Amino acid sequence: MMRKLMMAAAMLATTALTAHADDVKEVQMLHWWTSGGEAAALNVLKQDLATEGYTWKDVPVAGGGGDAAMTALKAMVAAGNPPTASQMLGYTVLDYAEAGKMGDLTETAVAEGWDKAVPAALQKFAVYDGKWVAAPVNVHSVNWLWINKAVMDKIGGTEPKTFDDFIALLDKAKAAGVTPLALGGQNWQEATMFDSVVLSTGGPEFYKKAFNDLDEDALKSDTMKKSFDNLAKLKTYVDPNFSGRDWNLATAMVINGDALVQVMGDWAKGEFVAAKKVPGTDFLCYRFPGTDGSVIYNSDMFGMFDVPDDRKAAQIALAKATLSKSFQSAFNVVKGSVPARTDVPDTDFDACGKKGIADLKAANEGGTLFGSFAQGYGAPPAVANAYKDVVSKFVHGQITSSDQAVDELVKAIDDAK
Ligand code: GAL
């Protein structure tokens, strides 16, 4: 009986995984990867799928952090016209899964052994109710500094190990007449930087309590006030034209030597790579001062929608390609992120990538791997948006003190929960 059941299950799996002549040979993907580095990384995927006979229907919605893309996605899904897959972050995947909109990749996941290779921190968001609903393509980390090496040499700077060291370094750049800090004044960029400031100011336990557990005492603590004080200090090193600037233009300021440093997720490295810059020679990657040993992560997931039967083979092909070991290496080398599987060799990665892979492993094993609040891995989208809004109002002077910022943060999070 058992044997018969197993054979039947195996036959079913084969049927579902086999392509049919009338299948739509097209992958339609919604994403916000429109910068030079991002587009180069996406090309790796398009080419992989092309060799398997799938065409690519691009649905790009510009805007780092993905807010605009998520608005577009909502409209497509509401109209009953979901893409094959969409780039998504953490809690957004779970929201769509809860609403019953996602497909089921479990057969493919089991056949390919994803559960053994993908870290639990990602499975928490890619698996809903025991079913795989998304394919994680990478792990990004936000607590990094990206530094122009020539500018660093010119000002005689060394790696800042503490927040005070960082301020001293920024002062040196200012004294030399270089813009110290390249920032794009958009809410998601400001909040992404603030994630690091909070980890640096309060330490790992504090970050987790405040930004993953949403513990009210932590959120309204003096440590949170101090974090806003530190953010206010950083703001004084930004050039006057920062409002609304795209993140990759801020990265370009560092690449071109117009600014010393950018605090940004490692997608910034994708821009350096696209500009043919080499770590250690042209640029430096350091952990945000005071956060070494911890990793604030996000992961781009390809959320897989419940598409009509004739589009399922393309979806499965996309999912398989995404999690293949060779693709995980090739794509992430270009993207600036690290593999979403623990069994991919770091051979082809540059020095920053190798450090990223080692840091992720250590943080995962040591309990210091935390979801990025700004990047959708700390709390559901409504709460994350409330957070981004308060941080941005503070940076742009609509909230005028750290005391007020803390009050507003607690209130906004409470309202959004
Ligand atoms: C993040 C995403 C990255 C990168 C960045 C800027 O949310 O995880 O892959 O694309 O936005 O666009």
Image (cartoon, rainbow, N blue to C red):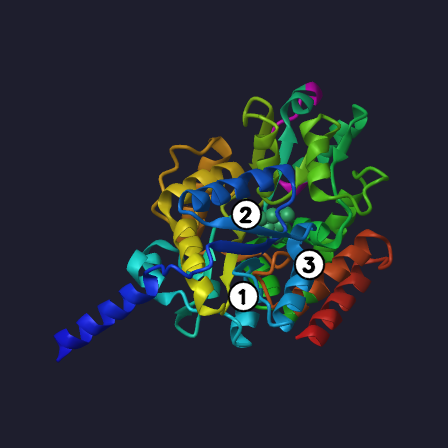
CA separation in Å, label 3 and label 1 = 14 Å
Disc 1 designates what residue? Answer: 93
Q: Give the range drawn in magenta.
A: 154-163
Tag 1 secondary structure: helix
Q: What residue type is labelled 2?
A: Ser
Q: What residue type is labelled 1?
A: Val
Q: Which amino acid does label 3 sit on?
A: Asp
Q: Are marks 1 and 2 in contact (CB under 8 Å)?
A: no
Q: Dot 2, how many residues are within 10 Å of its Cα: few (below 14), some (14-19), or many (20+)? A: many
Q: Where, quadrant-wise, is the N terminus in this rendering? A: bottom left
Query: Which residue is located at x 72 percent, y 76 percent?
Result: 415
Residue 27's place in the image compared with 184, above or below, is below
Query: Which residue is located at x 74 percent, y 66 percent?
Result: 409
Residue 276: give x, y in percent of width and height.
58, 26
Residue 108: give x, y in percent of width and height.
35, 61
Horizontal side of 156 relative to 308 (left or right) equals right
Query: Which residue is located at x 33 percent, y 62 percent?
Result: 17
Residue 218's place in the image compared with 193, above or below, is below
* First reached walking from the N terminus: tag 2 or tag 3: 3
Quarter holding residue 346 = top left
Tag 3 secondary structure: helix
Q: Tag on residue 141?
A: 2
Front position in the image: 313 or 77: 313
CA separation in Å, label 2 and label 3 = 19 Å
Residue 312: give x, y in percent of width and height.
43, 63
Front position in the image: 14 or 352: 14
Secondary structure mainly formed by the magenta segment: loop
Nearer the viewer's eye, disc 2 or disc 3? 3
Disc 3 designates what residue? Answer: 67
